[in-house]
Amino acid sequence: IPLLMQDTITEYHPGGNIKSVSVFSNNQLLSNRNWTMTGEEYIADIFYSVETEPLFGPGTVAMHSHVMNAFRSSNLDLSQVEGKIVVGFVVMETGEIKGIRIEEGLLPELNQLAVEAFSSLQGQWQPARLEGENVRYYQLFPINFFYRKHEFDALELRGGALYWEIY
């Protein structure tokens, strides 16, 4: 049975606040309004599913490098940070990004640094496409932190070389 989307569809955040209200006619999205988890209005007419996802013009390596450099050049001690930050933003139909926000965060300083890293990202995006048209698309970008604490079971210096065992 094919799915026919018609009328108004309301989605909710986990806490119960409205996330979006979308109006469809014959499977065509006519409009949608969006809100943050706290109830603030967000960018309208965003697509969460498209035929072609957006691409960062300079490439993902350049984007990863920029974000990593932002954290490295900060004076924050990241040596024992473990967890994940998820940054969300809208790639507009023009290729610029707007509405940068933290979907899942760790510490306020790290969250702010992630937002600043994406705010200062240089380069144009190739917009998402749906039915041959450029559309607004909600993009998620995870930043993972790994803490590797090593405790040595044995540490020995032999013949000018250091040998160790980790348990």
Image (cartoon, rainbow, N blue to C red):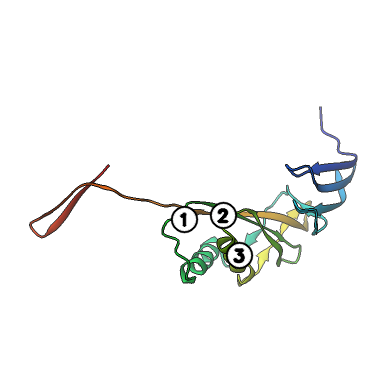
- Provide residue 156's location: percent of width, then percent of height: 14, 52
Type of amino acid under label 1: Val
Q: Are marks 3 and 2 in contact (CB under 8 Å)?
A: no
Mark carried by residue 106: 2
Residue at point 63% right, 59% down? 55
Read off the residue under disc 3. Answer: 112
Residue 57 is marked as none
Residue at 60% in and 65% down: 112
Say whether disc 3 or disc 1 marks the residue closer to the N-terminus.
Answer: 1
Gap between marks 1 and 2, in whole Å? 9 Å
Q: Secondary structure at mark 3?
A: helix
The number of callouts visible is 3
Most extreme residue toward the left is 159
Please name whichever residue, 18 or 61, is drawn nearer the observer in this view of the structure.
18
Could you say where residue 149 lies in the image, as x and y percent from the top left?
35, 50
Q: On the image, which quarter does residue 98 sit in?
A: bottom right
Which element is circle 2 on?
Answer: loop
* Mark 1 or mark 2, earlier in chain: 1
Question: Which one is nearer the viewer's eye here, 59 or 90?
Answer: 90
In the rendered structure, the answer to whether residue 75 lies left or right of residue 138 reads left
Q: Amino acid at mark 3?
A: Gln
Q: Position of residue 11 (x, y in %)?
A: 80, 42
Distance of label 3 from label 1 (alpha carbons): 15 Å
Disc 1, disc 2: CB below 8 Å?
yes
- Quadrant for the C terminus, please: top left
Q: Residues within 10 Å of mark 1 (few under 14, many from 20)?
A: some
